[in-house]
């Protein structure tokens, strides 16, 4: 059972014109930096790619959440760019799930499998032995600032029961109230974007997620 909660600010809500300055403002209070990579196909938005990840300056591990089709084409480049956790979506695997998770591990990264809100968590059960992390999406992937979907809590509980030592990442709609619910359900990594980068006091916002 994972007990200590880790906070992963999502740069999706940061000012990209001064990205490393934004990261520096949260780095002392955070544990991971989360990078949402979107291709405009799997999700209806386009964000950043490998070249931006290469230029991120941080001492914290970087989680690259690949909301893209055919992630197997790019995982090696993201690993070389500095990713320490690579999250891929079960919905994009096209029967290559085990192969891709094994490749992520061979590259020296933690292998993480993500599921959208409508995807039953049981769909990833057979891959749990190959997973270091699971990402439970608590909003529809694609845009920041959405409201938390409560059904995510049942998925968190299921994962914690099935694999007590897995890192459970919750992504979407995280604030002080939903963070508490996620922690109680068994999550130990919380991704927060607008709640952190939109706060007047970012340190206080992050600390409220741990309380």
Image (cartoon, rainbow, N blue to C red):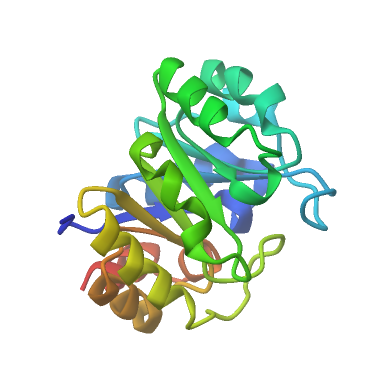
> In front: 63, or 94?
94
Q: Which residue is drawn at 44% across and 46% down?
A: 126
List x then y, in percent, for residue 168. Answer: 35, 55
Q: Is residue 187 above or below residue 65?
A: below
Residue 79 drawn above or below residue 69: above
Image quarter in which the C terminus is found: bottom left
Which residue shows up at 53% across the image and 70% down it? 138
Query: How many numbered marks are there?
Result: 0
Residue 58 is drawn in which quadrant?
Answer: top left
Q: Which residue lies at the image location 52% right of the left edge and 74% below the top edge?
A: 173
Q: In this view, does 55 lie to the left or right of 128?
A: right
- Horizontal and vertical percent position of residue 93: 66, 40
Provide residue 53's location: percent of width, then percent of height.
Answer: 59, 29
Point 33% across, 73% down: residue = 182
Q: Position of residue 207 (x, y in %)?
A: 26, 67
**Residue 56 seen in this snapshot:** no
């Amino acid at each position: 059972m994972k007990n200590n909660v880790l906070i992963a600010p999502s740069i999706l809500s940061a000012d990209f014109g001064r990205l490393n300055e934004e990261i520096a403002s949260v780095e002392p209070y955070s544990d991971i930096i989360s990078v949402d990579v979107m291709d405009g196909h799997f999700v209806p938005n386009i964000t950043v790619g490998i070249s931006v990840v290469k230029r991120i300056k941080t001492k914290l591990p970087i989680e690259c959440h690949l909301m893209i089709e055919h992630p197997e084409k790019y995982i090696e480049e993201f690993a070389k760019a500095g990713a320490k956790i690579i999250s891929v979506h079960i919905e994009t695997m096209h029967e290559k799930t085990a192969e891709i998770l094994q490749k992520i591990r061979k590259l020296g990264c933690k292998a993480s499998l993500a599921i959208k809100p409508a995807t039953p968590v049981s769909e990833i059960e057979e891959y749990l032995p190959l997973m270091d992390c699971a990402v439970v999406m608590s909003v529809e992937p694609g845009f920041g600032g959405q409201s938390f979907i409560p059904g995510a809590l049942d998925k968190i509980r299921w994962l914690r029961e099935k694999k007590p030592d897995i890192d459970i990442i919750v992504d979407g709609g995280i604030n002080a109230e939903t963070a508490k619910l996620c922690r109680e359900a068994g999550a130990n990594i919380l991704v927060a974007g607008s709640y952190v980068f939109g706060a007047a006091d970012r340190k206080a916002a992050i600390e409220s997620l741990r309380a």
